[in-house]
Image: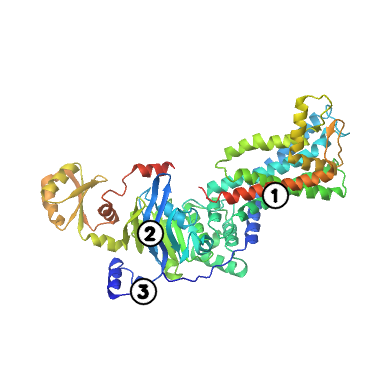
Amino acid sequence: MSELGQKVRSLALPNRTDFMNTTDFAIEIHQLSFHYGERAALDNLDLTIPAKQIFALLGPNGSGKTTLFRILSTLETFQHGKVSVLGLDLSRQANAVRSLLGVVFQSASLDRKLTVLENLRCQAALYGLAGAELSKRIDEVTEQLRLRDRLKEIVETLSGGLKRRVEIAKGILHRPKLLLLDEPSTGLDPAARLDLWQALTQLQSVDGVSVVLTTHLLEEADKADCIAILDHGKSVAYGAPGALRTELGEQVLSVLSTTPDQIVQWLAGQNVQAAIHQHQVRASGQKVAQLIAPLSEHFGSQIQSVTLGQPNLEDVFIARTGHQFWHETPSSDMKRAK
Amino acid sequence: MTPVTIEVPKPNSSAAVMMLAKREWVRFFRQRQRVIGALGQPILFWLLFGTGMRSSFQSGGQDFMTYYLPGTLALILLFTAIFTTISIIEDRREGFLQGVLVAPVPRWTIAAGKILGGGAIAWVQAMIFLTLSVIIGTVTPSIDLFAVAGLMAIGALTLTALGVSFAWPMESTQGFHAVMSLVLLPMWLLSGAFFPVPLPQEGGTVGQWVMHYIMRCNPLSYTVSGLRQLLGGSAGEGTWMPSLTSCWIGSIAFLAITFSIAWFIVLRNQRARN
């Protein structure tokens, strides 16, 4: 790799040094399109997902991330484009890809009537795992996910967090090279989310598994090594979350007020562009910090709070797409109705 | 892109089939209401109809209790096969199926596991009833009972394969109930299970002819009739019954046909749905 190339990459991913030395990608997507009737869920998507990292596909509902997940997990066949997973062609070598993939679905894929152990054994049979190797793996994954004392329990009696842990145990039982997870935090309480991330980080750092997850939660994407933000079936931002945020370079001023329109007008008078979303006025620029005092003087009690901070991933999304993350488009409604 | 050589493990299809079959088994017997539904209702029918219709029924020198026994066996096979294959729809809805669909096993292993597991459950249930009938003396023990067991095994696999063919493309269990009452139960009723196949007389009504040929073309008639003959029954006056050889051929042919249909449907419907 050229020196310049290294520099560019290290700029894009400042918190990952090992990434510079890896040339392999877990997933390479080239010109991928997928249509539901007339509507394009994925629109000439180009994306590379680095190996041995935690990668998050962030996007609002209807952005195409679930469709992408279904394609990558081999549940859905695609119409146009080329996808290679761990160097294998997804459309021609789907079965080979399947044995290297661990898949954790958003909806449960466990048999609720079976015990944890029976579920794991069932999974093992599907992946050709048996005998001493299977016993060893069951020991390992149940240790890793702290499920040892739950093996004999019937799945439907377990809590949501435990069920998700069993799902992950099931997904990694056959030592996949790549673990795919669809909205893994959905339905989990904060403690269970923390557990989940600990497990994922351990998998990635200790076992060298490439982890790819979809999420619509900005704070979850922030924890990934590298992310891609999807919008309307296209990748609109790509890189380490920290790098994407600092790329905006500026501080963000957000004002919670009863009269947001007047504040936007006033800011425009100060040559600062501002926008309203989720009842907040948000403006970025080098001078926004200096505006806090005159702003509070001018609007006084109409202001409930003023915050100055680093841009978050939502700001990145707005900067790249020109619209809000939670903006409901007709197409996203359609997708949900489906 | 640099070519990557990754060692791809080869999953064992037969191990997967056996595991999926075993799963059916465990699930079925863990849900007690299923066992009761599949075994209890046919036995209840047998006792009620057998007792109630004793005085008004005569065929081939048998009372209704004896006549209706092969039909009850077929009904137990049918009910159990239906209860186990309906679980395909639940598997799809509850998400278990998607986990199997992303596994590196051929798709037919799912259907094979279902048919083998469901068929074994149906067969065991029918065997339990047969054993009970021997104990209470309705059936006399003989060497033919081994043939009965064999024919029931064929029937069990056939009906489970048929159930898989119906359940696989279905979105809801409600749809399956429609199939049950419009296809499967009429098929059972018109198999000679409940009343003998009428032999059309010279100058008989059109209805008689139609009924005769519908029942004669019903593949299940051959299994029921085979069971009846192996259990000592014979054609009564004015009724039709195929030869025992025809019964075996008909039953095996029906098995081959339902297997092929199930195979075709599962492989054709490659796209998994949630």
| Amino acid identity at mark 2 | Ala
Which residue in the protein does label 3 denote? Answer: A21
Placement of the N terminus of chain B among the 4 image quadrants: bottom left
Subunit under mark 1: B
Where residue A296 appears, x then y in whole percent? 13, 49
Element under disc 3: helix
Instruction: Sort mark 1 into few (<14), some (14-19) or many (20+) by Cα contacts within 10 Å.
Output: many
Q: Amino acid at mark 1?
A: Gly
Q: CA distance from mark 3 to mark 1?
A: 56 Å
Q: Which residue is mark 1?
A: B119
The x and y percentages for residue A162 are: 49, 56
Secondary element type, mark 1: helix
Helix, strand or loop at label 2? It is strand
Marks 3,1: beta carbons within 8 A: no
Which chain's residue wears label 3?
A
Q: Position of residue A253 (x, y in %)?
A: 19, 53
User: Do tag 2 and tag 3 residues touch (Cβ < 8 Å)?
Assistant: no
Neighbour class for label 3 at 10 Å: few (<14), some, many (≥20)? few
Badge 2 crowding class, 10 Å Cα cut-off, few under 14, some 14 to 19, many 20 or more, is many
Tell me, yes or no, if residue B34 can be seen here: no
Number of on-image labels:
3
**Marks 2 and 1 on same chain:** no
Q: Which residue is mark 2?
A: A56
